[in-house]
Amino acid sequence: NAKWPENVNTFEKAIASVDVAYHMNHRRNGKELFNMQTGKIIEGQIGHNRFYPSSGSGNTAIYECGSFYPCDFDLGMVEALAKRFKPSGALFVKVIHDDQKPCRKKGGDTCTYNISW
């Protein structure tokens, strides 16, 4: 029953909206960490998530998570969104944790996921 940004109807919008969605659903001192009127995130120490879409006509993207949720939770979130909003013409979507990058399970600040289709 989490709130989600409106008009999320494509792969790119879905993955890029996670950071705002996390902030919409968390509060500090009773205030939502996303201001609907201004469209700005209010910093609240819950981390950030960044989406790097494929360049040009490529079929890969990168998703970097710095949230306070466990690595496996974020992996599941990205997998579910990627499959639900599969890129146009894609037969499948695959999300893989990039073990060559820092990992929150190992004390890193972020985890990186490679998305391909």
Image: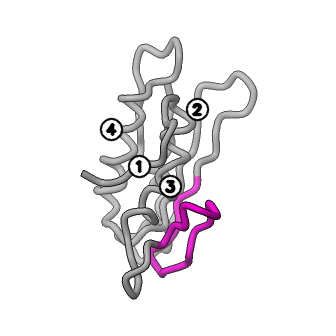
**In the rendered structure, which disc, 1 or 2, sits on the residue that comes first in sequence?**
1
In the rendered view, does 26 fall on the left or right side of 33?
Answer: left
The dot on residue 60 is 2
Q: Quadrant of residue 91?
A: top left
- Coloring applied to the structure: one colour
Span shown in magenta: 33-50
Could you tell me residue 82's position as x and y percent?
42, 34
Measured from the top left, where is residue 43 in percent x and y? 55, 78
Relative to 108, residue 58 above or below: above
The amino acid beneath tag 2 is Thr
State how far apart marks 1 and 4 are (Cα).
Answer: 14 Å
In this view, the residue farthest toward the bottom is 29
Label 2 residue SS: strand
Sequence-earlier tag: 3 or 2: 2
Kindly identify which residue carries mark 4: 80
Q: CA distance from mark 3 to mark 2?
A: 13 Å
- The image's mark for residue 112 is 3
Q: In the rendering, at what x and y percent does residue 4 appear?
A: 41, 49
Residue at 44 percent across and 66 percent down: it is: 103
In the image, residue 55 sits, relative to residue 19, either above or below, namely above
Disc assigned to residue 4: 1
Q: Secondary structure at mark 3?
A: strand
CA gap, disc 3 and disc 1: 22 Å
From the viewer's perspective, tell me whether residue 18 is left or right of residue 105. Answer: right
Classed neighbour count for the residue bearing mark 4: other residues with Cα under 10 Å, few (<14), some (14–19), many (≥20): some
Q: CA distance from mark 4 to mark 3?
A: 16 Å
Q: CA distance from mark 4 to mark 2?
A: 16 Å
